Amino acid sequence: MREAVARSRPEMAPQPDLSGYAQKAISVARSILTGADDRALAQRNAVIAFGVRVTSAALLYLTQVLLARWMGAFEYGIYVFIWTWVLVLGGLSPLGLNLAVIRLVPEYRERGELDNVRGVTFGTNLAAFAIGTSVALLGAAGLWLFESYVANYYVLPLYLALVCIPIYALGDMQDGLGRGQAWMSIALVPPYILRPLIVLAAMIGAHEIGLPMTATTAAGAAILATWLAALLQFTLVSLRMSKTVPAAPRTYNWRLWLKTSLPLWVICACELALQNADVLIVSSLMSPHAVAVYFAAAKTMSLIMFVHYAVGSAVANRFSALNARGDREGLQEFVRDAVNWTFWPSLAAAVLILLLGQPLLYLFGPDFLEGYPVMLILVAGFLFRSAMGPSEFLLNMLGEQNACAMVLVFTAVLNILLNLMLVPAFGLNGAAAATALSLIATALLQYAVARYRLGLDVAIWSAWKR
């Protein structure tokens, strides 16, 4: 009887031997952690950047949830509006020099031109802070002159937000100088982890001592966090520079630096338009409550873009160095790696975020659930851009910043026009559609430039086939 039962049982399917996969994974991890070659260094920097961005995304999300809960949608919408202006004006103040140094510093170091390294470091820091200060003063003067045209609830928070701009610009310069020399921790930890931590701590303290949870209080917390994080970062970068570049006379080549940076500044301006035009146009046409709902949904979905930024931050200086050496084969191989590192984690993150989308929005409050369709629309644009890898970093580092700037000028204008047309007709979903279409157009045009101007295919389907 037992033999009959045994014969009646289906044979167990052979189990795959997972030991080979495990050994391969361990080998890859060991190579990334201990390898001394350029590819291992780039992978290690990508892992650091990815880890920082994941941690930052969690901190920022927690901070935004708490702010929305404490302040309510109306005050939270005001804070979103004024902080968006800090991001735009502070990001524009360095005139693109914060991006130019990512390319210039590796080239100078590769050629042993340390006098130029010293000059570009000192000069660009001074310029960024001076221009940021000028922008803040002009902004305050403009706000004072046209205060009657601004809604009363925006005025005081806007004045406070202007205080952040000079140091925000200086912090952006430290980010560029750090990334240009593959100092990923110094480049990324202060602005992306320390700054939101200080905002969170300041707002918790304000809440505990009974201060009103308004946009004005949040703006004060932002001032404290922005200044402390940027000053610490400036100190760390300066100390690291003093150890790797001996003190000696500096050489200044402003003509070259500005020639390099101004197209990058145009690119930065257009990137900021692509990232923030929807919020600013929704702010001008709809209530602070609508701004809060849109911002929560858009920023929840845009969490997938930290992969794109993390990989781009890690590989940009490597693109420049390989190009400076004339290593065409190494560059092509590295581009394929960067595309794969960007797309597949982005796809996985997108699926997870959409599955958790409604519970995540509910954390902000029940009213925020109406923003879920915004997430469904935006994901198409974000994923399409990720499918082209860090193509804008590649174009900028290989001397195609003018072409990249033209692409982004076109798509930024397209984004603004689409938002102006679609937001009045379709509200928040119109803003999401405008941004998604603009991101798709950006990705397609950057793909065309990389292929026909550089001979490099940056699409994920091409990298996958190889």
Image (cartoon, rainbow, N blue to C red):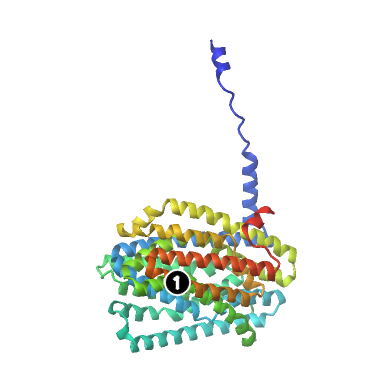
Q: Residue at x 38, y 60 (%)?
A: 62
| Closer to us: 7 or 285 | 285
| Closer to us: 236 or 379 | 379
Percent from the top left, x then y, of residue 59? Answer: 42, 61
Q: Is residue 305 above or below residue 180?
A: above
Percent from the top left, x then y, of residue 294? Answer: 38, 65
- Disc 1 is placed on an element classified as helix
Q: Residue furthest top?
A: 1
- Residue 325 showing in the rendered view: yes
Crowd tier of the residue under label 1, counting other residues whose Cα lies within 10 Å: few below 14, some 14–19, many 20 or above:
many
- Residue 242 showing in the rendered view: no
Looking at the rendering, which quadrant does residue 370 occupy? bottom left
The tally of labels here is 1
Q: Residue at x 34, y 89 (%)?
A: 145
Percent from the top left, x then y, of residue 87? Answer: 45, 74
Q: Residue at x 64, y 72 (%)?
A: 397
- Horizontally, residue 272 falls left or right of residue 333, namely left
Percent from the top left, x then y, of residue 154? Answer: 32, 77
Q: Which residue is mark 1?
A: 276
| Closer to us: 432 or 354 | 432
Looking at the rendering, which quadrant does residue 261 occupy? bottom right
In which quadrant is the C terminus drawn? Answer: bottom right
Q: Residue at x 45, y 64 (%)?
A: 433
Please name the amino acid that badge 1 sits on: Asn
| Closer to us: 363 or 146 | 146
Looking at the rendering, which quadrant does residue 33 occupy? bottom right
